[in-house]
């Protein structure tokens, strides 16, 4: 018998950390196959199906044989439609020529980072943050500088923090508003102040607005809604969260005009174009009637948020910050553990409640925080199970 080969893999790829929430999801699904009753609060996916108008538009396109590639930058009608959406929804004047349609927002971010980063460039971002942001930078052999943030800044970067940590080698700064895992916002005036500071430093400002639309107690806003914005702003967005089209894998970026040509060329090589049926579905979801249905769903998420906050407070749990958007609560569990991964694993095994350890999102406080997603309706039952579990740890 021949000896097994030991074929190498990329050193860069080997250093990529796992996405822990997917491990938790896999374990939860395995328990379900054994007949266990699982309450899913780990995955950031709305429990609503995509709107019927999306299905109908995609099927109609397919029945007409409209299943061929679109231009790499996206279906012209969809780029125009998004331009109109920004005008109507955010009072932002965005030319369609600056809109780039991508296969999901992850592809949008990969595209943008590939366009602007050289090896050993640095991207500054908060800790905690969405884990894939770090991995994308590292895949390009660039560096991540994570700035610890906490409740004192609402778990967000500020202009003051940028000034404190500024180094000339920083190529881009990335923030999210609303943020994953915290659901917190950066006020629009502060965002603009940050953008202007970075423009003076000739530095890109990448703003993840994936959860815009899912904002509570206030109107949804985009940094692009300001009358005068510097040319260093790159916005990333998605049809997954507010629009409820997770499996359709469709996102977009709004980039400065000077980047559009390189984004086009990169997209031609990396994925050719976004899925055609998804783009026709997105055209339908941007119509006024569909947006009205999505507003009803937004109100449902707001109601769930309020129920989860109330249930946790009634159970005696202290919440240091309350989410203003998205569908997450970032909970400090230092009263119970200094090992959030073990906490989540034991909670799942003993109670059937699946939540995500804070270590997925960074090193700063990751071992003493967990994320709960209120993407399903079994909120009070989940909190009751969690309360019974934590009684054993007190």
Image: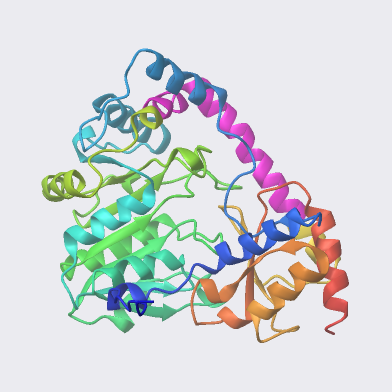
Q: Is residue 377 magenta?
A: no
Q: Is residue 283 magenta?
A: yes
Front-most of residues 351 and 127:
351
Above/below status of 142 relative to 294: below
Above/below status of 393 relative to 119: below
**x, y percent for residue 293:** 59, 28
Q: Which residues are magenta?
A: 280-308
Q: Quadrant of the N terminus?
A: bottom left
Name the residue located 53 percent from the left edge and 77 percent from the top edge. 150
**x, y percent for residue 43:** 60, 56
Q: Is residue 172 left or right of residue 52?
A: left
Residue farthest to the front? 1
Front-most of residues 107 and 198:
107
**x, y percent for residue 266:** 17, 50
Front-most of residues 99 and 216:
99
Prevailing secondary structure of the magenta residues: helix
The colour scheme used to paint the residues is rainbow
**Would you identify the image quadrant in which residue 169 lies?**
bottom left
Q: Quadrant of the C terminus?
A: bottom right
Name the residue located 61 percent from the left edge and 47 percent from the top edge. 217
The answer, for residue 286, to whether it is visible in the render is yes
The answer, for residue 322, to whether it is visible in the render is no
Above/below status of 105 relative to 88: below
Residue farthest to the top? 64
- Number of callouts: 0
Name the residue located 50 percent from the left edge and 19 percent from the top edge. 56
**Would you identify the image quadrant in which residue 214 lies?**
top right
Q: Is residue 33 left or right of residue 224?
A: right
Q: Is residue 202 left or right of residue 279?
A: left
**x, y percent for residue 66:** 32, 19
Front-most of residues 280 and 216:
280
């Amino acid at each position: 018998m021949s000896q097994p080969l030991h074929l190498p893999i990329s050193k860069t790829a080997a250093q990529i950390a796992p996405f822990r929430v997917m491990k938790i999801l896999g374990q939860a699904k395995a328990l379900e196959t054994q007949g266990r009753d699982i309450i899913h609060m780990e995955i950031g996916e709305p429990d609503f199906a995509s709107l019927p108008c999306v299905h109908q538009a995609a099927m109609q396109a397919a029945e007409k044989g409209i299943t061929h590639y679109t231009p790499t930058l996206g279906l012209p009608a969809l780029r125009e439609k998004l331009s109109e959406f920004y005008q109507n929804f955010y009072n932002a004047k965005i030319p369609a020529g600056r809109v780039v349609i991508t296969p999901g927002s992850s592809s949008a971010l990969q595209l943008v980072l590939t366009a602007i980063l050289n090896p050993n460039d640095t991207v500054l971002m908060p800790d905690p943050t969405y884990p894939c942001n770090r991995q994308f930078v590292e895949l390009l052999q660039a560096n991540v500088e994570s700035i610890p943030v906490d409740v004192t800044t609402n778990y967000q970067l500020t202009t003051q923090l940028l000034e404190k940590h500024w180094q000339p080698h920083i190529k881009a700064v990335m923030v999210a508003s609303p943020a994953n895992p915290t659901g917190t916002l950066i006020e629009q005036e502060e965002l603009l102040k940050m953008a202007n500071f970075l423009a003076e430093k000739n530095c890109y400002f990448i703003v993840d607005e994936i959860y815009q639309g899912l904002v509570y107690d206030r109107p949804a806003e985009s940094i692009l809604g300001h009358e005068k914005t510097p040319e260093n702003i790159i916005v990333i967005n998605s049809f997954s969260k507010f629009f409820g089209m997770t499996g359709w894998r469709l996102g977009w970026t709004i980039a400065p005009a000077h980047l559009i040509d390189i984004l086009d060329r990169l997209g031609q090589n990396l994925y050719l174009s976004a899925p055609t049926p998804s783009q026709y579905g997105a055209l339908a979801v941007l119509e006024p009637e569909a947006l009205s249905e999505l507003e009803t769903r937004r109100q449902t998420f707001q109601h769930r948020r309020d129920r989860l906050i109330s249930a946790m407070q009634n159970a005696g749990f202290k919440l240091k910050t309350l989410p203003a958007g998205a569908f997450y609560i970032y909970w400090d569990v230092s009263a119970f553990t200094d090992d959030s991964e073990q906490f989540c694993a034991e909670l799942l095994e003993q109670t059937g409640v699946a939540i995500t350890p804070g270590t997925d999102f960074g090193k700063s406080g990751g071992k003493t925080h967990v994320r709960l997603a209120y993407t399903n309706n079994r909120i009070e039952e989940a909190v009751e199970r969690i309360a019974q579990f934590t009684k054993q740890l007190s």
